Image (cartoon, rainbow, N blue to C red):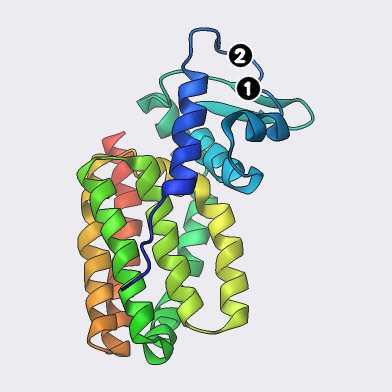
Amino acid sequence: MAKKFDTSAVERAYNLLLARIQQDDIQVNNKLASEPDLSRELKVGRGTLREASRILQASGYIEVRPGKGTFVVSKEGINRNKLADWFIENEPKIKEFLQVRMALEPMTVRLAIERCSDKDIRNLRAIHQCAVQAAAEKNSAALAICDENFHTFITKCSQNKLLVEIVKNINDLMKDFRGKTFLLPGNIDNLIPAHEKILEAFELRNPEAGAQYMCQHLTKVVQDYENSKEVL
């Protein structure tokens, strides 16, 4: 049986921290407790809490102020105007990230399909099913986690240590983008069919098809980004 992949650890931490933020005793501009204290209070690991905090920050609930701590900036999350401003402000950086992904990820998926085991494919399918559920629920936070898990696992299957390290660094830089792009409903709807095609290439053991579908997927991500500026 395939390992059950889900977003439970990070998503649980996200939900606990969001519930804490939305309690009546917390107001906008309040400073949250330190990471060690929150970790103990919520009974989650510090690494998991850090991941959840990054998603909450991307969603517009909190803000990390260097040297000062983490502050609540909204109890409802990011609004359309702020979302539009973020995409405009970060446009050069986003385009650079997407260009690098276009160059690396088709090669990565080709290697992964050539080298993965049957168990790896079952695990990738399990990761995808978590994304399907998150998309059905319009859960943008969970979907951001699922999307990162999907691409990270493919890189792991490539068995190329340098690629694993490079993609890890890209993922760290892409967290804000992933956290915000799935706030747009159209982007949620486009993710599942794209990942399904890539997964089918794994199941058919077709590296060239996998590379082609990854190119199509990332091209659509770029298009979605361009369209988002018009929607917002």
User: Looking at the image, which is closer to me, 112 or 184?
Assistant: 112
Q: Which image quarter: residue 203?
A: bottom left
User: In this rendering, does residue 45 appear at all?
Assistant: yes
Pointers 1 and 2 in contact (C-beta within 8 Å): yes
User: In this rendering, does residue 219 appear at all?
Assistant: no
Residue 62 image offset from top left, x and y in percent: 56, 27
Residue 58 sits above or below residue 102 on the image? above
Residue at position x 30%, y 55% in the image? 130
Residue 124 sits above or below residue 128 on the image? below
User: Looking at the image, which is closer to me, 189 or 149?
Assistant: 149
Residue at position x 70%, y 29% in the image? 37
- What amino acid is labelled 1 in the image? Phe
Residues packed near mark 2 inside 10 Å, few (<14), some (14 to 19) or many (20 plus) = few
Q: Which image quarter: residue 204?
A: bottom left
Tag 2 residue = 29
Residue 212 image offset from top left, x and y in percent: 29, 80
For the C terminus, the quadrant is top left
Tag 1 residue = 71
- What amino acid is labelled 2 in the image? Asn
Residue at position x 38%, y 79% in the image? 120
Residue 102 image offset from top left, x and y in percent: 43, 71
Dot 1: what SS?
A: strand
For the N terminus, the quadrant is bottom left
Q: Which image quarter: residue 207?
A: bottom left
Residues packed near mark 1 inside 10 Å, few (<14), some (14 to 19) or many (20 plus) = many
Residue 158 sits above or below residue 140 on the image? below
Q: Which residue lies most toward the front here?
A: 1
Residue at position x 38%, y 68% in the image? 3
Residue 124 image offset from top left, x and y in percent: 34, 71
